[in-house]
Image: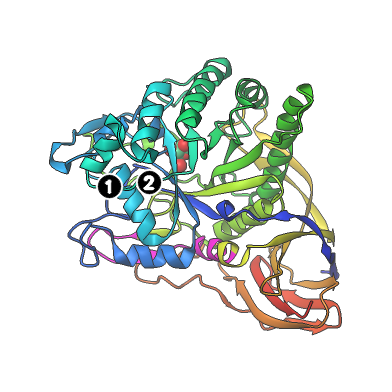
Amino acid sequence: MRNVDVLLHRDFEIGVTDRRLFGAFVEHLGRCVYGGIYEPGHKTADKQGFRKDVAALVRELAPTIMRYPGGNFVSGYNWEDGVGPVAERPRRLDLAWMSTEPNSFGTNEFIDWCRATEIEPMLAVNLGTRAGDAARNMLEYCNHPSGTAWSDMRRKHGWEKPHDVKFWCLGNEMDGPWQMEAKTATEYGRIAVEAAKMMRWIDPSIELAACGSSGRSMPTYGAWEETVLEHTFDHVEFISLHTYINNYAGDTPAFLAACDLMDSFIDEVVAIADAVAARRRSPRRIMLSFDEWNVWYRTRRNRQERVLPGWPVAPPILEEIYNMEDALAFGGACISLLNHADRVKAGCLAQLVNVIAPIMTETGGPAWRQTIFHPFAHFSNFGRGRVLRTQIDSPAYAANYYDPRGPQDLYFPVPEAPYLKLSAVHDDKEGMLTLFALNRHLTEEMPLRVDAKGFGAMKVDTALQLHHADLQATNTKEAPNRVAPSPLSSVRIDGNHVQATLKPASWNVIRVKATR
Ligand code: AHR
């Protein structure tokens, strides 16, 4: 491949990454909670039943905020079922995942787990089968100090101090017919705004996210965001976005171009939110919460295929096994999120453990890292700072991405996907410039030359690559490190230039220490 050139300047930035961009998601779904983060009786379990081996991997992964308890699950959830003495908590049918929910883990346990792992909690309220009343009561239970029935109930349950949860999601994917009590945009907009008003009257310090479309290919996409924001504009800080990238078509170049469609998705939602602002002549800007994103398709297809008979507790569903090419597509999504740091202020990798997850466990056995673990850990550990504008001169290819969830148009063209997908983040406190670089060419090495202006003298600090000759390679319990980062030895500094040769189909992280 010919030289691929990137031009950037220390002083030209897109925006600063919000801490909450690097979040993940724990849903009552399959073995995410039970047998995932929580497994009393496991040999590494602490006295609350939290798996310490999982917690250690979570620390390494470094998510900053954790969404809970769903997902589809939340649209039928009675939060009261999950608090109080465990022996008295009801078992319920969960119609989202056709399972039995024992409720032995609930909001208070989740908050304790978050505190133990030093992660900020993000809670979702049920606006499916329930509405504003349940939402305001839950907020009062969680955040009000004392002296009312709900807050004193929390204290009686053993949590004296308020949980002080700042980030709240107003329901989940309410546009989706698979949702319990799905709604039209007007129905949802009305319920969401009334819930938001009451919640903020109880605690003015909270931030709220309204549901956007459950995907860019939903037939109501666009009109949904507009209507919902017309109702909620003055009462929420965020609108949500969800994307699951697939390779149903077995078309790897198109799979790796899917993150460019995420870029379009973000740009479009920003445009709609700003159009709603413009109609009001309002300077207010609604931010984006990309609170579900990942690669997911093998275990997705339809409800029947993934549901086990007999209403099991914590069945092993949605246990997607990720390979090398998934890690590349996933890395592309990380770059898309970084490059929209000005408007995407929160994000949640869906999900955390076992269920479409970077961490896998065996119930009663070990825990290990899936391939997608690595790009996320790099993204979160090294992606904090000022995201810089970049000008990229790279050869490109045309792709046609297949999404079976689309309305009529099952193919989404990407006319020009540059082989290089890149993000540059400057941490000015550490004096560190980090380049995240994906070589989307499947067979050719990429000679990369980054002209990084304004940094003074530079020195390579760390350079890593994720590459495997077999794009289908996976990590397993027996071979947990088959796909793992290795040093990228080709990096050189030549004056202002950072140069490297990137392997075909590789994810790369180059960190350069700068004097300015
Ligand atoms: O993350 C899995 C599911 O995907 C979530 O429950 C739902 O919100 C989405 O459809």
Q: Element under label 2?
A: loop
Q: Is residue 395 above or below residue 189?
A: below
Query: Circle 2 sits on which residue?
Result: 163
| Magenta-span inclusion, residue 369 | yes
Give the magenta-colored segment's residue range. Answer: 361-378
The amino acid at mark 2 is His
Q: Are marks 2 and 1 in contact (CB under 8 Å)?
A: yes
Rendered residue at 59%/34% (across/down):
215
Rendered residue at 51%/27% (across/down):
196
Give how far apart the Cα atoms at labels 2 and 1 are. 8 Å
User: Residue 245, how many percent across, how many down?
Assistant: 58, 45
Residue sitting farthest toward the front: 147
Rendered residue at 29%/49% (across/down):
109
Q: Element under label 1?
A: loop
Of 34 and 360, the residue lying toward us:
34
User: Residue 57, how many percent across, how many down?
Assistant: 40, 66
Query: Circle 1 sits on which residue?
Result: 159
| Magenta-span inclusion, residue 19 | no
